[in-house]
Amino acid sequence: MNSHIKYNEWLIVEDGFNPENNLASESIFSLGNGQMGQRANFEEKYSGETLQGNYIAGVYYPDKTRVGWWKNGYPEYFAKVLNSTNWIGISVRIDDEELDLSSCKVLDFKRVLNMHEGYLERTFKAKLNSGKVVRVRAKRFLSIVDAEISAIRYSVTPENFNGNINFELYLDGNVKNQDSNYNEKFWDEVSRHSGKGEGYVMVKTKKLDFHVCTGMKYFVEKNGEIQDVKPIVNDREKYVANSIDIKVKKDEKIVIYKYASSLSSLNYSVENIMEKTVEVLDKAIDKGFDNLLEEHAKAWIEKWEESDIIIGGDIAAQQGIRFNIFQLNQTYTGTDERLNIGPKGFTGEKYGGSTYWDTEAYALPFYLNTAGAKIARNLLLYRYKHLEKAIENATKLGFKDGAALYPMVTMNGEECHNEWEITFEEIHRNGAIAYAIYYYINHTGDKTYMTDLGLEVLIGISRFWSQRVSFSTDKNKYVILGVTGPNEYENNVNNNWYTNTIAVWTLEYTLEALSYVNNVAPDKYNKLLDKLNFDSEKETKHWKDIVKNMYFPYDEKQKIFLQQDGYLDKKQIVAAELDPDIRPLNQHWSWDRILRSCFLKQADVLQGIYFFEERYDIETIKRNFKYYESRTVHESSLSACIHSILAAKTGDIDKAYELYLRTARLDLDDYNKEVAEGLHITSMAGTWMAIVKGFGGMRVHNGKLCFNPMIPEQWENYSFSIKFRGRSLIIGVTKNEVKINNRSDKNVSVVIFGNEDKLPGYGEKVFQKE
Amino acid sequence: MNSHIKYNEWLIVEDGFNPENNLASESIFSLGNGQMGQRANFEEKYSGETLQGNYIAGVYYPDKTRVGWWKNGYPEYFAKVLNSTNWIGISVRIDDEELDLSSCKVLDFKRVLNMHEGYLERTFKAKLNSGKVVRVRAKRFLSIVDAEISAIRYSVTPENFNGNINFELYLDGNVKNQDSNYNEKFWDEVSRHSGKGEGYVMVKTKKLDFHVCTGMKYFVEKNGEIQDVKPIVNDREKYVANSIDIKVKKDEKIVIYKYASSLSSLNYSVENIMEKTVEVLDKAIDKGFDNLLEEHAKAWIEKWEESDIIIGGDIAAQQGIRFNIFQLNQTYTGTDERLNIGPKGFTGEKYGGSTYWDTEAYALPFYLNTAGAKIARNLLLYRYKHLEKAIENATKLGFKDGAALYPMVTMNGEECHNEWEITFEEIHRNGAIAYAIYYYINHTGDKTYMTDLGLEVLIGISRFWSQRVSFSTDKNKYVILGVTGPNEYENNVNNNWYTNTIAVWTLEYTLEALSYVNNVAPDKYNKLLDKLNFDSEKETKHWKDIVKNMYFPYDEKQKIFLQQDGYLDKKQIVAAELDPDIRPLNQHWSWDRILRSCFLKQADVLQGIYFFEERYDIETIKRNFKYYESRTVHESSLSACIHSILAAKTGDIDKAYELYLRTARLDLDDYNKEVAEGLHITSMAGTWMAIVKGFGGMRVHNGKLCFNPMIPEQWENYSFSIKFRGRSLIIGVTKNEVKINNRSDKNVSVVIFGNEDKLPGYGEKVFQKE
C-alpha cells in the first residue's frame, strides 16, 4: 500500500508532505461533480512536480492523429477532454517571498478527501526561507447541487511575524494538455475582463469552437470581518487577476473565499455565457461558502444512502470500496445524456477522457442499480444518438447496408483511436453495446426501450456481425478472422472465443427482439424496417445460418473453450511461475514476447462466461476458471473484478477475496505505479460488481432479483443498496444471515439462495444462510 | 506508361514541361555516384512542386521516434539519410525578373538522362513575363571517377534582347528532410566562408556530429571566353553566394561552370575537411568540365561493359532494364563496406535511406555477378561488422547467450523501425542474412569467408532461431509463433511457412558450416567456439532436434505449402476477380480488411521455393506457383521479380514476361503512383534477376555455372554479362541458339540445358536450343 495514505472509513488522508507522490496524490484527491473535475493541485504556486488539471465534461479537442506509420482507415484525430482555465489559483507572497511548498520547509502537511461530504481539505505550516511561518488551511468543493459552482476557502495565519501578505487571485487560461500530440495549445482567447473583485476569461478551442467562460468573484476576511480590499487589477492574454495587499499581525487569520464558475457553449449560447457566468457567481456569493458547502454535503450524504457499501471488520476494504463509489459518483451523474464515463474520469489526461466499451461492459450496472434506470437509460441513449456515426464508421471500413461499428474510443460518435490492432480489430466492443441493451431491459423491465430505440441499434450491430464473419470452406463453419479480444495481449487472432460468442449472441438477441417488436408494436416494427431497408427474410435467414454454424475454438481433451485458434500452440506456463521481477509484463517484455506468450491481460473466455453464465454448467465454469485464471496476469484494470465474480460463483471465496482486494485498492495502493496519470474510474464499477454480483451473488432472472450471498472470512458483515424497478433495497450480510430491507412502499419479490420470497413495502426479512 | 517519358535505348527523355509530373521526374532523372545522390531539381529557382534533395551516403540523423502508442522495445530513433547542402543552386535574374519555370512560359523543355555516359541534361526556352526569351542548357554529373566532384555547365542565351543577367551561384545548407518526424532541421552551421569565385558551408548534424563541408568554385564564359567577373559576395546562416552581373546582347551565350564538392567527417578529420574541399575543387578546376565529363563518361561505358543487358526487338523492355541497371550502379559501388543500398537509393527520403533485408534477398546477386566478388563481400562485411549490435538488439528483446537478431532497418546496426508487427515480428530477415552467406560462397567458391567471418554470424543467427521457436505440446512439433512474413499483408501469424523454412535451413546450414570449419581449420574453429562460449554438444543437439521436428503448415488436399496457420480459413478469391477500382488494395481497403483477406503483397511460399528450389520437384513448384500467384496482388515492389523467375522455371514464359514487364518499368511507368517519393532501387536488382535467373535460367550448382535460357516471344534476342570466379562471360540468346563468350583468359565450365561444356579462355561457343 501507499504508506502515506492512511486507512480510514470515510476519509482519504495523506499525512506528511510527499513531493515524490504528489502527482499520484493529485489524482487520488481529485474532485468532480459530473460536469467538471479538478485534480488536487495546490492553490498557491508549486514549482515541484505537478499536473495542473481542470477538465470540463463534454468539451473536447480533435487533436491531430500522431502515428509512426499511417494505415488506411485511421481517423484524423483523437478527441481529448480539455485541460481548461485554471480557476483555483491564489498566489501568496509573504513580504518579499512567494509561498511555494517546493522551496520552503513544510510542516504538518495533511491532505484530506472527505468522501462523506465531498470536499478536499489541505492544511500545512510553511516555514519560509525568511524564517517566517504561516499556517494555511484550504478547503474546496465542486458543488453537486449546483454543478456550475466551485468554491474555495483559503486561510493564511502568520505564526511568528507581522507583515504584508499579497494575494493574487487569478484565472489562467494559458494551459496545455500534457498529452497534446504536437505540443500545441488548444485554446484561443475570445475576451477577458478583469474588475475589482472579479475576473472573467473567455476562451475557445482552436477547432470545433467550444467556448468556455470562466469567472471568479471573491471576499476577503480578517479575523472574521470582511475587508474592503483595494485590489490591483492585472491581466494579460488568457489571464486575469486581482492583486491584494493585506497587512497582518501574528496570529491574525486572513480568509479568502473564492467562487468560480466555468460555463460552456455546450449549455449556453456564446452570446449569453458571460452574462450567465456573472449570474452564477452572484448566486454563489449570495448563498455564501458555508451554505453552499452544507447543501453540497447534504446531497453527498443522500448519494451515499443510495450507493454506500458498508463492510464491517476490514477497514482497508471499506475505504477501498467507498473510494471507488465516491469517484464513480464524482465522474458521472447521468443527468446529461451527451456525457459518458472516461476511463480516468476527470483525474488525468490519459485515454483522452473519451468513451470506451468500459461503459457498457463494466460501468452500467453500478449506475443502474444505485442511481436508477433513468440514468442508465441515458448511457444507452448516448450510443443510440451515435448510431449514425457508427454506421459511417463501418462504411469507412468497407461495410455496407447500414452495418454499424461503434468506435473503440469516442467523444462524439466518431472513432478516435489509431492503433490498427485495436481500432479496427477490437470489434467485440460492438457486442458489449448490444449486451448493455439486454442488461438494461433485463434489470429494468423497460421493454419500451427495445421497441422505441434498442432494436434499431441491434439491427445495425447485427448487420455488422453478419458481414464481418466469413465462411471457411476448410472448417465448413463461419469464422471471424483478424480480431483482438478484450485480452489485448494478442492481436490479429482468428476465432477469438469471446468475440465469436458475443457476435452470435447479438444475432440471436436481435432475432428475438425483432419478433418481440413485431408482436407488440407491429406499426413501429414496419416503420423501422422500412426506414432501415431491412429485408427481413433474407437478412434473418443469413443470421440464423451464422448462429447455427459458427465455429468456436474448443479443446476436447481439457474440455475448455479456447481463447482463440492456436492458443494451445503456445508454451503453457502459469502466471504463478513468473519471476516477480518481470511483472508487470508490459513494463518488462517487448511486445512480441507478450503476444506469443500464453499470458492474458484479462481472460476473454471468462468475460464471456461472466456475460452468459446461464449457458454453462458449474463444472464447465470451474474448469475454464481454473485454466484461465492461472494464466491471467491482470494487467488490465478490468480483469480482477470479473475473475472475482466468477471465483465467488464457483464457491472459491478466498480467491474471490484476493481478486477483490486487487481491484478495490488498485489506485489507493497504486499497484501498477501509474496513478500519477489518473485513476481507473471504470474499473471501480467492476469493484462494486465484485461485491454486489460476486459476494452478494445478485442476478436478475425472469424479472426477479436473486441473491446468493457469501461473506469473506475477513469480514464481519457487509451491506449494499440496490435500486430495482422502483424499489430500493438494502441487503445486509453477516456470517450467518442475510437481511433484506425494502425501503420502498411497494412489494418486491426476491429469490434468496434459490427460494422466492416476497417483501412487503418497507418490509424487512432475515434469511438464515445455508 | 508515363506518356511524357519517351522510349529510347540509352536515354530517358522527358519531352515538354510537365509540372504535374515534376516530383516524379525529379526521382526518375536522379544522379548518383555511390557517394552521393542528387534529385533532378532545377538549378534556377522553381516555385512549383519540388523536393529539393541531395543526399550523402553514410551521413544520417537519428530522428526521434514518432509513434501513436509506445510499445516496450521500440527504438528511440529512426536513422535518416540527410538532405544536405544544396550545391546546384544558380539563381538567374534577367534584368528585373527572376527566371522561374513556374511563373513564365516554358517552350521546348526537354530533360534527358544519358544512361550510357551518366549525365543529366536539361534544355528549354523561357519566355518571361517581360517578353524576353532566353535559351538555357544545363548539364551536370556526379563523377564516378572522382566521387568527390560534381559539376554543372549552365548556359543562358538571350534570344530577343540585350540586357543584364544576374547570376547568384550559391550553396544553401538551410535544408530540411521532408520526412523529419517533428518538422525539425537536422543541421547546425559550423562555419562558412564566401570569397570571390568560391564559397564554403560547413554544417554538422545536431546529433552524432557528422560534419559536412560543401564547397563551390566556378568560371564564367561569354561567347567562349572566360570572363573576369566582379562578384558580390553574399552570405547568411548556412548560405554563401556570389552574385554576378553580366551585360549580354542578343544571341551571346553565357556559360557557367560550377564545380562542387561535399566532403564529410566520415572520410576526413573535422580539422581537414575544409582544406580537402579546396583541394578537390582546385583539382576539378584544373581538369575542367569537358575532361571531367569525358573520363566520367568513359568510366560509365566501362561499367556498361560489365553489366549491360541488351534486348533486341523490345525497346520498352530494353529501356526498362538499362534504367534499372543504371540506377543500381548509381546507388552502390561497393568500394566502402560501411555503405549499403537503401530501398530508394538517393532518389527520395522514404525508408530513410537505411538498409533492409532487400540487400541480401534481392540486391546481392546483381552486384556479385556484375561488379564482382569483392564488392559482394563488402555487402557481407557490412553485416559482419554489425553482429555485435545484432546481439544487443536480440538482447533488448529478451534473447540471450549471443543470439543475434539483425534489425529490420538500420544505418549503423541498431534497429530503427518502430512498427511492432514489422520491427519485432518480421524476423525472417535474419534468415536472409544467413542465406546471403550461402549465396556468396556458392557463387564465388570463397570458403575462407565461412572460416574467417561467416560462421560467427551464422552461429548468432542460429542461436536466435533456436530460442525463438517454441515447442507446441498440442502439435508435438516446434512452432514459430507471432511473426510477419515477407507478405506484410498479414501480421502476427503463427507458423509462417517461409519463416519456419528459412529458420530450419539456417540451422542446417550452420551445422554444416560448423563441421566444415572444424575440418579445414580446427584452430580457428576452437578459437571461435571459445570466443562465443559455444557449447557444441548441447547447442547442436537442440538445433538438430528443431530441424527434425519443425512444423510446416501444409494442405494435404491441394498438396500445397500453406502461407501460415489458418490461411485456408480465409475466403479464397483470386486477384483477377478483384474490381480494378479497388487496386492497389493498400490505397483502398482499411488495414484489417487487407489482413483478413487471402491476398498477398508478395507470396512467401514462392519466396521460399525460389531460395530453396532444389528441394522441390517441378510439380510441387507448379502447384504452389499456380495457387499463390493467383492470390498475389504484387503491391510489394519485391514481388513480381520472384514470381517472374518461378514462372520461367515452370516453363510459363508468357507469365514470366508479363511479370518481368511489371518489375522492369515499375518506376518509368509509375505503376503505383508513388515515384514522386523516389525510385524502387532494390527491386531493380530483382528485375536484373528476372532476366538472368528467370529467362537466362542461370544457377550455380556444384561450383558450376548453369543456364537454361528461354526467350520471350516479344524479343528477338537478348544478352547479359556475368562475372563468375574470375571469369567474365557474355551470354547471348536468340530464338534458336545460345552463344556464350568467355571474355577472360581462363577456362570455364558451363552447364547448358543440363550438359556440361568447357569454354577455353577467350573462347566462344554456340549451343542450339532444344
Image: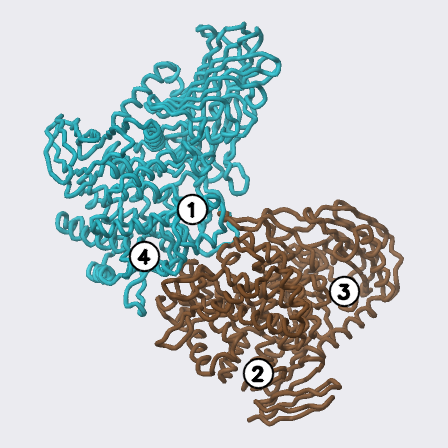
Chain colours: A cyan, B brown
Report how far apart the C-alphas of labels 2 and 3 lie in the structure: 35 Å
Element under disc 2: loop
What x and y, as percent, mark residue B345?
Answer: 64, 63
Relative to A548, B281 lies left or right: right
**Foreground label between 2 and 1:** 2
Relative vertical location of residue A675 with respect to residue B392 in this rendering, above or below: above
Q: Which residue is mark 1?
A: A416
Element under disc 1: loop
Question: Which chain does the residue under circle 4 lie in?
Answer: A
Q: Do callouts 4 and 3 point to residues on the same chain?
A: no
What x and y, as percent, mark residue A74?
Answer: 45, 52
Q: Is residue B154 visible?
A: no
**Foreground label between 4 and 3:** 4
Q: Earlier in the sequence, mark 2 or mark 3?
A: 3
Q: Quadrant of residue B281?
A: bottom right
What x and y, as percent, mark residue B469?
Answer: 47, 62
Q: Quadrant of residue B629?
A: bottom left
Q: Which residue is mark 2?
A: B697
Q: Residues within 10 Å of mark 2 (few under 14, many from 20)?
A: many
Report how far apart the C-alphas of labels 1 and 4 lie in the structure: 31 Å
Residue, x 52% and y 77% (percent of image)? B644
Report how far apart the C-alphas of labels 4 and 3 lie in the structure: 62 Å
> In the rendered structure, which amino acid carries the disc numbered 1?
Cys
Q: Residues within 10 Å of mark 4 (few under 14, many from 20)?
A: many
Question: Which chain does the residue under circle 2 lie in?
Answer: B
Q: Earlier in the sequence, mark 1 or mark 4?
A: 1
Relative to A219, A309 lies left or right: left
Report how far apart the C-alphas of labels 3 and 1 lie in the structure: 50 Å
